[in-house]
Image: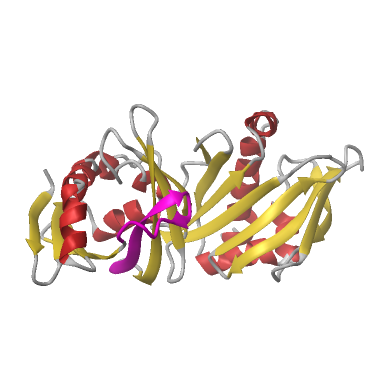
Amino acid sequence: MPITSVSKDTDDLTMTVVAEFPVPVRRLWDAYADPRQLERFWGPVDYPATFTRHDMVAGGESHYVMTGPQGDTSAGYWKFRSVDEGKGFEVEDGFCTHPGVPDHTMPSMRMTFAFEEAGDGSRVTTTTWFASLEDLEKLIGMGMDEGMRCAMGQMDAVLADLSAYAVGSGTTLDLLDDTHVRVSRVVRGTVDQVWAAHQDPALVRRWMLGPDGWVMTTCEVATEVGDTYRYEWAREDGSNGFGFTGELLEAQPPVRSVTTEQMIGMEGEGTRNDLTLTPVEGGTLVSTVITYPSRELRDQILATGMVDGMEISYARLERDVLVPA
């Protein structure tokens, strides 16, 4: 068990959990930064978490749902108050009535996560501040301390598994539920570089192409909230043209953007795409959570080879834009 201590202070209204792991601080930090890894340990074994949003930056938010063995769910959120990369972060932690909708009938807490070297490994100290003794006793009574023990107990396996998390491991697809998927990849390059590659039309044309033999015929980028974008492609001989258009709904340069997406000429509701860029060891984690109006449309689009096309584009982004020879 990696936990070295759990202490409660009814005078300061705090609970502090200290855990140590035989990995560098950077590896431990990235386990919290990457939602693919975070949801493998955040929550009890029989109530695993699914993160549909995780922008680890001051002012950002995380939304997650823990699902029990009988299909019962409990939703929660983090609101990031501060982030000091590699050293620590602070969040407001609370319950939700629905994903992303705070439940104000339940207590919220302030939590800090501090990372530091510890011998040949690293240590994370998680401190929770409660608003009142009543809140402390209520949440401890609901099993919060046991939940933290379970979370820390699952981290050894996550930290030891580097196969699913590394530069060069390719693009991964996670089916979050019937209408949400997450596509993610670690690419070589800084957050600023990757953001620019999504914003500069001259750069976008160099990598957002899918398989070889295609060209981007239209590249109109949305840079301000409310702007519309339009991307169109065709084979090099001009045949088989298609494209997408949509609106920029939210933007937090250089870490997050939210857009709608609709295939040009297709009737019906489109998708909502939530792009988050997170610095991790070796590059930037590019994570896109896509919301579909139905499971049927989700399956239809995934069956086109969308993820394979995105991997080809991301590989080209690394090769031709971020780390040119």
Seen at 34% across and 33% down, the residue is: 68
Q: Quadrant of the N terminus?
A: top left
Q: Residue 325: image x %, image y %?
A: 59, 58
**Highlighted range, magenta:** 87-107
Q: Residue furthest right?
A: 238
Nearer to me, 312 or 52: 52
Query: Is residue 37 at all visible to an observer of this figure?
Result: yes
- Give yes or no for residue 106 being in the magenta stretch: yes
Which residue is depicted at the point 66% across and 61% down?
198
Q: Is 192 on the left-hand or right-hand side of 87?
A: right
Residue 117 makes an appearance in the image: no
**189 sits left or right of 157 in the view:** right
Judge by depth and name the residue closer to the eye, 173 or 98: 98
Question: Quadrant of residue 162 in the image?
Answer: top left
- State the colouring used for the structure image: secondary structure
Position of 238 with respect to 318 (left or right) is right
Instruction: Please provide percent x and percent y for residue 249.
Output: 67, 62
Instruction: Look at the picture and state if 12 lies above or below 102.
Output: below
**Point 55% across, 40% down: residue:** 181
Total labels: the figure holds: 0
Q: Residue at x 51, y 60 (%)?
A: 277
The majority secondary structure of the magenta stretch comes to strand
Q: Is residue 318 magenta?
A: no
**The quarter of the displayed image where residue 258 is located:** bottom right
Q: Position of residue 90 (x, y in %)?
A: 31, 68
| Place of residue 256 in the rendered image (x, y in percent of width and height, measured from the top left) | 56, 63
